[in-house]
Image (cartoon, helix red, strand yellow):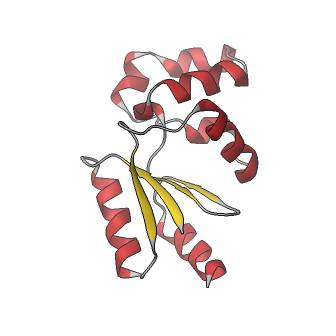
């Protein structure tokens, strides 16, 4: 069963969960604000995904903008970036989907459909 980290008030998360339900995908749901992933878990998932760490940041979020992270991240090493991501779930791109051998950040229906086909 996949793990899905979402923020309950996020419209994209609501759309993604509806999509999972419509496609009969079983998942375990986590509130990314209340049960945010640790920096260690995020580091493991980033390695598993092969995605750049920047893809794990919620670049459109209020906290990201308030902290002016677009200016600060280029000068931060990955350890510092992971520590920052692990400090607050609102900094993490959502929905964040974790499978046995894959990670999806954000909701892009085509990418999700492609992964779903691999799971069947």
> On the image, which quarter does residue 104 sit in?
bottom right
**x and y, in percent, of residue 73 in the image:** 61, 20
Of the pair 85 and 109, the residue shown nearer to us: 85
61 to the left or right of 81: left
The residue at the point 37 percent across, 24 percent down is 63
> On the image, which quarter does residue 78 sit in?
top right
The residue at the point 35 percent across, 76 percent down is 21
**x and y, in percent, of residue 36 in the image:** 45, 37
105 versus 36 height, above or below: below
94 versus 2 height, above or below: above
The residue at the point 71 percent across, 22 percent down is 79
Quarter of the image with the N terminus is bottom right
118 to the left or right of 95: right
In this rendering, the count of numbered labels is 0
The residue at the point 67 percent across, 63 percent down is 100
Of the pair 22 and 33, the residue shown nearer to us: 33
Quarter of the image with the C terminus is bottom right
**x and y, in percent, of residue 10 in the image:** 29, 48
Which residue is farthest left? 9
Of the pair 111 and 32, the residue shown nearer to us: 32
Which residue is farthest bottom? 120
**x and y, in percent, of residue 116 in the image:** 57, 77
């Amino acid at each position: 069963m996949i793990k899905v980290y979402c923020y309950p008030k996020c419209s994209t998360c609501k759309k993604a969960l509806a999509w999972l339900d419509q496609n009969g995908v079983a998942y375990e749901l986590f509130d990314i604000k209340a049960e945010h992933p640790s920096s260690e878990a995020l580091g493991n998932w980033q390695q598993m995904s092969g995605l750049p760490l920047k893809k794990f940041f919620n670049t459109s979020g209020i906290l990201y903008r308030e902290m002016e992270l677009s200016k600060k991240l280029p000068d931060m090493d990955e350890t510092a970036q992971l520590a920052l991501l692990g400090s607050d779930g609102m900094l993490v791109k959502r929905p964040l989907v974790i499978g046995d051998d894959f990670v999806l950040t954000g909701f892009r229906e085509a990418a999700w459909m492609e992964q779903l086909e691999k799971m069947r």
